[in-house]
Image (cartoon, coloured by chain):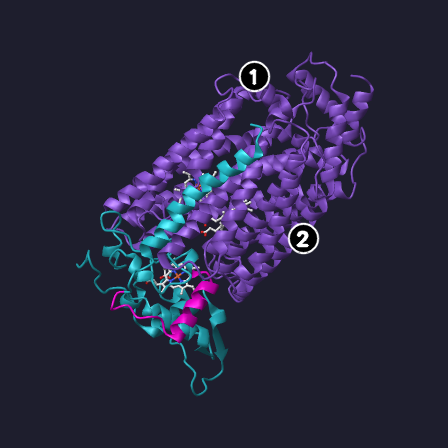
Chain colours: A purple, B cyan
């Protein structure tokens, strides 16, 4: 007991001390705001100019007029030329990662929809082992986590880093080789799961033999990113760079340690499993998505982040608190009590970075919310940012013992999982892809209305998915805690809510079909040829001395 | 911030603290656990059954970790006493689970020892629990016109037996049931026995 409390206190104090240590070490200018640092995402003279490559020319002018009607200062042409160079250097690898992401998104959505329907139609598609719920659900999980979200995250990182570091992407060929390894690994891993060969732990199902490939692929991409970092031509590292570089390093360590074969057993394996599980979410998808919002959102509306120092506080609190929350997946389980307590405490502490992020975004968007009407990309980003707040606040409460006792083993968790991974991470990734791809392909999105259609299908589908499943999950948990009600009652009462989830899932899947179809149309150069590629639109405008 | 080394080392220190707390300390704490005397290592057949359980993802609907009585009425549902780390020393991969779409199975062997029930339930859960949403596992069985010697036929309730055919359990199905029957952790554990 004593040693338990000591370790608990120890870990907690260490993280607080570490946190203050790092903030102190960065104290230079900590108390004075630093608008210059926040403005490095803009070229000189660019602040005040809206930027949404997903919009056609005249739409851009309308949005500009709505945002800052009188921003007319000339933009530094040399810096824009640097940015064009950066975009060119990363175009191939970024396109490759986006294409893989789109492929896996379709596979994953289909597998998710099948698993969802199977939960209320248990005699549907039962003749083949690979279509069994346990396998197709796992195929869904791996396809959307590693296939869709991770590929999209890598595309964003490889595209944003060169821009922010004002250099070209170094080692692009290695990044592409790494991408090939990663996706060959995911394909093999999903094939293995379908065939019944699995490591058997949630989020770590892909057999470790195959994980070696994925790890090697990741290492190659990381090398390329780090090589770009050390060859940078800016002094200041913008906050998105910290989030993204740290996320790459974190994920490499997490993935390596968690997949070490032969080390982990029994209860200790379970704690490692969830140390990995929530860190993959908290130290990989979350920082990449938060970093993406910190770049794209101010860029779109043409206004720097209001408080650069808040973003710094947010980064280090996330780093020191998020890592230790994994135990909240084992509350009430056969694990040392101090461990779950530590995780619950840190889960609640997570409110700090989340609030820091929210205040910052709220301030940055102040008076500019109406721009979402013009820019679908911005709409995705704002929606994602808001859902980061929602999923995290929900998560902090869900980690409390009294709430977790109800929700732990229920569909409520699955609803929260999709609020985080879909409404937050996936929506940010969609927005980022809508922004990046015109620059990557030198081509406009052929049918801008499809972007709006996609947004509403995704948002509406997600709302139905989340609301229904949260209610169903909560009722299920209450029934399970009531000794007077039979277990089967807790099962049957979920069925209508599981059906509503399938309805939401159909809308989301339709949205993905629209999105991927649009992607193909663009890659194959369909659609009206308007002002020319968005990239040229911008340079042409410069040439005209606007 | 200008220094990428500071960034990288800060990020790694943060992760190291987390790893110490969630990976290393539990490792040290449970490393020397002794298996309870009443807990037997799995037999070869049970291990194969366990592999079938893993491969088909039973864990995504069934937990194996009864909770304490002051947290949830797991005990009164017949799921058993709260489990302790020593109960899991032979488990690899762990199958604690995070969902209870179906009941906890940590003591299913004690609650439902019947092989016939398990085989029939795997073939068609709705033959026993009409409202069940557990998937059927027909691919673990074969339909034959007549049973051959050595075949384990499955006795199903009348409405659920295919007409004119017998249902024969595959070796995987038999092993899986052996594993389910072995899930019996009703022995008392020290120092906190939780007897009724
Ligand atoms: C096309 C719409 C989608 C549908 C119909 C769907 C459906 C499902 C279903 C049925 C499960 C299994 C839940 C269970 O074990 O009871 C699941 C799990 C999961 N899905 Fe989705 N999904 C969809 C899209 C996505 C997307 C795009 C993501 C993430 C980017 C995602 C992330 C996850 C995660 C993380 C889990 C595991 C949750 C847990 O174990 O608690 N899903 N999904
Ligand atoms: C402060 C932030 C957050 C906290 C404290 C938190 C807390 C939790 C808790 C308590 C659970 C339930 C564990 C259980 O009972 O089994 C959970 C599950 C989950 N959370 Fe969060 N959450 C947070 C943010 C997020 C974010 C941002 C995402 C997405 C990127 C996310 C994704 C998930 C997923 C996918 C699961 C399901 C894991 C599984 O069982 O397979 N969470 N979270």
In the orientation shown, which residue stands out farthest toward the left? B196
* Residue under the image location 28 percent in, 59 percent down: B79
Q: Chain of mark 1?
A: A
Position of residue A368 in the picture relative to residue A387 (left or right): right
**Residue A266 sits inside the magenta stretch:** no
Position of residue A47 in the picture relative to residue A500 (left or right): right
* Residue under the image location 50 percent in, 70 percent down: B139
Label 2 crowding class (10 Å Cα cut-off): few <14, some 14-19, many 20+? some
Residue A445, by quadrant, is top right
**Picture layout, residue A493 above or below residue A441:** below
Q: Nearer the viewer, residue A234 or A421?
A: A234
Q: Nearer the viewer, mark 2 or mark 1?
A: 2
Q: Which residue is mark 1?
A: A367
Q: Are marks 2 and 1 on the same chain?
A: yes
Q: Which residues are magenta?
A: B36-58
Comes first in the chain, label 2 or label 1: 2
**Picture layout, residue A334 above or below residue A366:** below
Label 1 crowding class (10 Å Cα cut-off): few <14, some 14-19, many 20+? few
């Amino acid at each position: 007991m004593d040693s338990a409390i000591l370790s608990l206190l120890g870990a907690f104090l260490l993280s607080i001390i570490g946190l203050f240590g790092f903030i102190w070490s960065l104290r230079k200018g900590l108390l004075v705001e630093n608008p210059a640092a926040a403005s490095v995402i803009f070229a000189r003279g660019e602040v005040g100019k809206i930027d949404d490559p997903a919009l056609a020319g005249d739409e851009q002018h309308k949005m500009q007029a709505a945002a800052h009607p009188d921003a007319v200062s000339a933009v530094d042409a040399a810096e824009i030329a640097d940015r064009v160079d950066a975009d060119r250097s990363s175009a191939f690898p970024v396109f490759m990662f986006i294409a893989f992401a789109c492929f896996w998104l379709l596979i994953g959505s289909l597998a998710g929809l099948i698993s969802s329907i199977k939960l209320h139609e248990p005699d549907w598609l039962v003749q083949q082992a690979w279509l069994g719920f346990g396998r197709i659900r796992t195929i869904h999980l791996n396809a959307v986590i590693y296939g869709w979200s991770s590929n999209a995250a890598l595309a964003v990182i490889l595209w944003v880093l060169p821009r922010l570091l004002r250099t070209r992407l170094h080692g692009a060929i290695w990044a592409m080789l790494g991408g090939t390894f990663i996706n060959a690994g995911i394909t093999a891993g999903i094939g293995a799961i379908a065939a019944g060969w699995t490591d058997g732990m949630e989020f770590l199902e892909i057999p470790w033999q195959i994980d070696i490939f994925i790890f090697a692929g990741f290492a190659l991409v990381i090398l390329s990113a780090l090589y770009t970092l050390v060859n940078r031509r800016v002094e200041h590292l913008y906050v998105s760079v910290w989030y993204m570089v740290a996320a790459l390093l974190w994920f490499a360590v997490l993935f390596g340690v968690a997949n070490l074969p032969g080390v982990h057993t029994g209860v200790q394996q379970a704690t490692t499993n969830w140390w990995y599980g929530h860190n993959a979410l908290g130290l990989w998808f979350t920082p990449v998505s938060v970093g993406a919002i910190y770049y794209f959102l101010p860029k779109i509306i043409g206004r720097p982040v209001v408080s650069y120092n808040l973003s710094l506080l947010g980064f280090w609190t996330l780093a020191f608190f998020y890592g230790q929350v994994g135990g909240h997946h084992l509350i009430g389980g056969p694990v040392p009590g101090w461990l779950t307590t530590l995780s619950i405490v840190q889960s609640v502490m997570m409110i700090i970075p989340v609030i820091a992020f929210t205040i910052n975004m709220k301030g940055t968007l102040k008076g500019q919310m109406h721009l979402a009407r013009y820019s679908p990309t911005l709409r995705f980003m704002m929606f994602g940012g808001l859902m980061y707040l929602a999923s995290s606040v929900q998560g902090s409460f869900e980690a409390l013992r009294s709430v977790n006792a109800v929700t732990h083993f229920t569909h409520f968790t699955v609803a929260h999982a999709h609020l985080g991974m879909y409404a937050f991470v996936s929506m940010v990734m969609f927005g980022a892809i809508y922004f990046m791809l015109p620059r990557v392909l030198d081509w406009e999105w052929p049918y801008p209305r499809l972007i709006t259609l996609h947004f509403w299908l995704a948002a509406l589908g997600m709302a139905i998915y989340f609301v229904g499943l949260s209610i169903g999950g909560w009722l299920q948990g209450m029934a399970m805690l009531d000794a007077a009600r039979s277990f089967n009652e807790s099962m049957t009462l979920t069925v209508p809510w599981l059906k509503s989830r399938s309805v939401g899932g159909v809308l989301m899947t339709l949205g993905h079909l629209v999105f991927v179809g649009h992607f193909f149309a663009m890659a194959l150069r369909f659609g009206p040829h308007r002002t020319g590629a968005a990239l040229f639109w911008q340079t042409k405008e410069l040439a005209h001395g606007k | 911030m200008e220094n990428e080394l500071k960034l990288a080392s800060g990020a790694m220190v943060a992760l190291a603290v987390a790893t110490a707390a969630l990976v290393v300390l539990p490792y040290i704490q449970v490393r020397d656990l002794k298996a309870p005397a009443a807990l037997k290592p799995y037999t070869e057949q049970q291990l194969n059954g366990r592999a079938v359980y893993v491969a088909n993802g039973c864990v995504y609907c069934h937990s194996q970790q009864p909770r304490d009585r002051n947290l949830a009425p797991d005990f009164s549902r017949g799921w058993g006493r709260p489990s302790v780390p020593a109960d899991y020393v032979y488990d690899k991969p762990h199958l604690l689970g995070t969902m209870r779409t179906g009941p906890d199975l940590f003591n299913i062997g004690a609650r439902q020892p019947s092989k016939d029930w398990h085989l029939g339930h795997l073939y068609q859960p709705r033959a026993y629990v009409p409202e069940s949403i557990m998937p059927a596992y027909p691919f673990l069985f074969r339909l034959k016109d007549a049973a051959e010697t050595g075949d384990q036929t499955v006795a199903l309730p009348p409405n659920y037996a295919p007409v004119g055919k017998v249902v024969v359990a595959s070796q995987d199905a038999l092993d899986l049931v052996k594993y389910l029957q072995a899930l019996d952790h009703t022995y008392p554990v020290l120092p906190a026995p939780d007897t009724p």
